[in-house]
Image: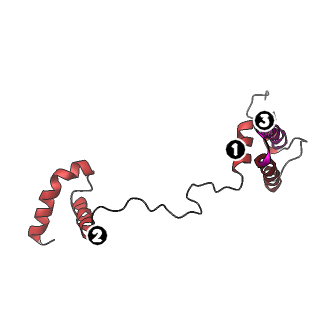
């Protein structure tokens, strides 16, 4: 195929799997290179960071955006909550007995949204009290 084709032997596919010297890079080698670039990137000035990214683009054979993201985020957890406990969140307004009753009313009303459920809560609570539920 031509240069813009999608054949497995196209230049783009070759560039992705090979380093700057044309030798295939293993994942561990790429990670080691990114780790080394990250250590230098953190300590560098703004212009130095640009030069480091240029080197990363050449050696890792990727676009600049990908190289920048790899160098900036190497070693960080990928998910925001990874390694952290959950935030405590908002304190409940109602006590546990009221929450249980609201859950039951919600189940009876087929889990309608709060705005749709609000007008019927009083009727549902009265019906539950009459039946002893």
Residue beneath disc 2: 96
What segment carries the magenta color? Answer: 43-62
Residue beneath disc 1: 69
Residue 86, image x and y in percent?
A: 49, 62
Q: 32 or 86, which is in the foreground?
A: 86
Q: Calculate the distance from the C-alpha at mark 1 to the C-alpha at mark 3.
A: 21 Å
Indicate whether residue 24 is drawn in magenta.
no
Residue 52, image x and y in percent?
A: 81, 41
Residue 21, image x and y in percent?
A: 91, 42
Task: Spot the residue most to the right.
Answer: 21
Q: Is residue 11 above or below residue 119?
A: above
The quarter of the picture where residue 67 lies is top right
Residue sitting at 11 percent across and 63 percent down? 126
Q: Sequence-wise, which precedes: disc 3 or disc 2?
A: 3
Q: 124 or 80, which is in the foreground?
A: 80
Using residue 77 as the reference point, say whether residue 33 is left or right of it. Answer: right
Residue beneath disc 3: 12
Q: Sequence-wise, which precedes: disc 1 or disc 3?
A: 3
Residue sitting at 21 percent across and 57 percent down? 109
Q: Residues within 10 Å of mark 2 (few under 14, many from 20)?
A: few
């Amino acid at each position: 195929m031509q240069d813009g084709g999608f054949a497995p032997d196209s230049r783009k596919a070759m560039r992705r799997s090979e380093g700057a010297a044309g030798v295939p890079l293993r994942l561990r080698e790429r990670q080691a290179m990114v780790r080394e670039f990250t250590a230098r990137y953190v300590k560098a000035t703004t212009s130095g960071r640009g030069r480091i990214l240029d080197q990363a683009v050449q050696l890792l054979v990727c676009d600049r955006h990908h190289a920048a993201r790899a160098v900036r985020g190497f070693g960080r957890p990928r998910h925001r909550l990874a390694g952290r406990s959950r935030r405590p969140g908002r304190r409940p307004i109602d006590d546990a007995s009221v929450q249980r009753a609201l859950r039951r009313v919600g189940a009876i009303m087929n889990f309608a949204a709060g705005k749709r459920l609000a007008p019927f809560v009083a009727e549902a609570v009265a019906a539950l009290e009459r039946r002893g539920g």
